[in-house]
Image: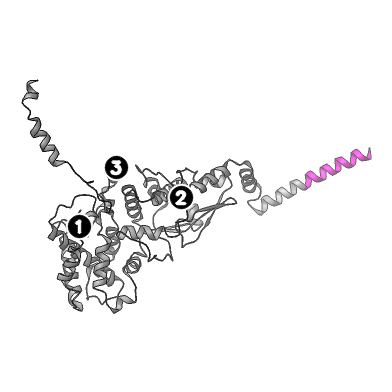
Amino acid sequence: MEQQANIDIDQLSSSVRSRLLHNSPMSASCCIFRVPSPLRKHDEKLFTPTLVPIGPYHRDPEKFQFAEKIKLWYLNCLINRAPTAHTTLECFFTKIAANVNHCLECYGDEVKMERDEFVEMLAIDGCFIIELFRRFLKIIPTSAYDPLLKMPWVRIVLVTDLLLLENQLPWFVLDCLFNLTKSDNDSERGTFPQVAQEYFRWDILRTPGVQVDLKLQNKHLLDLQRNIMLLGSEELEDGDFVPIPRVTELLQAGIDFAVGEKHNFMKITFKKGILTIPPIIILDNAESLLRNLIAYEQCDENLQDRIAAYAGFLDNLIDTNEDIDYLRQKGIVTCFLSPEDVSGFFNRLYNDVHIVHSPFTKVSKEINAYCKSRWPRWRTRLTRDYFNSPWSIISLIGALTILVLTFLQTLYAMLYH
């Protein structure tokens, strides 16, 4: 009782009451998140920029001195190449400052920066990305020596950095700056989504021939990549995630594989014992892209678990080198990794990931039902054991001929007697 008597209840209540929040600490506009610890713990570097930090989460001018110098050089080139009333720092800052609250709400974690510093960062980082895209695509002339274009190793690192969940800028900033600085050359390439897609086209994990939908409402560059990968999957119905056997087990059950449409990443179908999967190309940093896409889906409640479910489906299929080798033979998977790396990559993908719904429920149930049927399995064994070579077929025909002749001889003897 004495301890309670020494506590000023009114002061304590007043202190807590003053700290109460009237609104959620996270806005409904939030789309740029910190990767949760359970997902990050497996490999920290898959979520951390190596060369270029973008946005507030990894801002560290001392650590990334080279990148900060490049950003300021690119900005100088951009505003002085063909000066207009729209290509000034004042114009950039004014446009972004008018929407600074919306930009702040896009970040899941508190942005610990003064507003003017935050606006400056958005403008510099946004102009860097736009200038980089235009230089790489040769929309604008480049200097004799640009280290980001001339050093081969930089290209893949840049692409990886720009598609990290924690390394994003709000789409408004990029689209606004692109339109303010657009020249006649840019009109040949179209809108900012088209330019961005062209920059990322040949890297990481892609489906050839997919074209961006200009009606999509993108939130940032990683969201654009996800939207492109999911084009054509709108009609899929989500259900519970249903596991399936791996490739070699499906082959034993009489199921074969075929390569599907290259324009529809998610169109996986099963019909008459044939599992059809669109082709995918996996480069060195595909794991980084997929892990960041999965983390994005896990953080945003408005997103369906499409990429996570796709990774889970492939993880079920690919468990050994035999599995990946067969998919490569079929042209379904093209990769620049060893079979061991690819199978391990899919096996690791959704550690600690919770998949609520999957667009492949119907296909998975059909596969499992087919596996329970005896006739396809018997047919596969018959084909494998007796029809796998011309000599096996000849031997079988010879044996059947002898059997028929023996039967006829026996029948004739019985009738004769």
- Name the element at disc 2: loop
Q: Is residue 134 visible?
A: yes
Horizontally, is 172 left or right of 79 in the view?
A: right
Q: Mark 1 highlights which residue?
A: 101
Q: For the point 34% across and 53% down, which residue is it?
A: 293
N-term-proximal mark, 2 vs 1 = 1
For badge 2, the amino acid type reads: Pro
Q: Mark 3 highlights which residue?
A: 38
Horizontally, is 27 left or right of 227 in the view?
A: left
Q: Is residue 269 above or below residue 417?
A: below
Q: Determine crowd level at label 1: few under 14, some 14-19, many 20+ residues with C-alpha closer than 10 A.
A: few
Pick whichever, 234 or 20, lies toward us: 20
For badge 1, the amino acid type reads: Asn
Q: For the point 17% across and 56% down, which residue is it?
A: 59
Where is residue 73, by image quadrant?
bottom left
Give the mark toward the camera: 2 or 1: 1
Give the mark toward the camera: 3 or 2: 2
Residue bounds of the magenta highlight: 401-417
- Name the element at disc 1: helix
Pick whichever, 29 or 335, lies toward us: 29
**Residue with the most extreme left position:** 6
Inter-mark Cα distance, 3 to 2: 25 Å
N-term-proximal mark, 1 vs 3 = 3
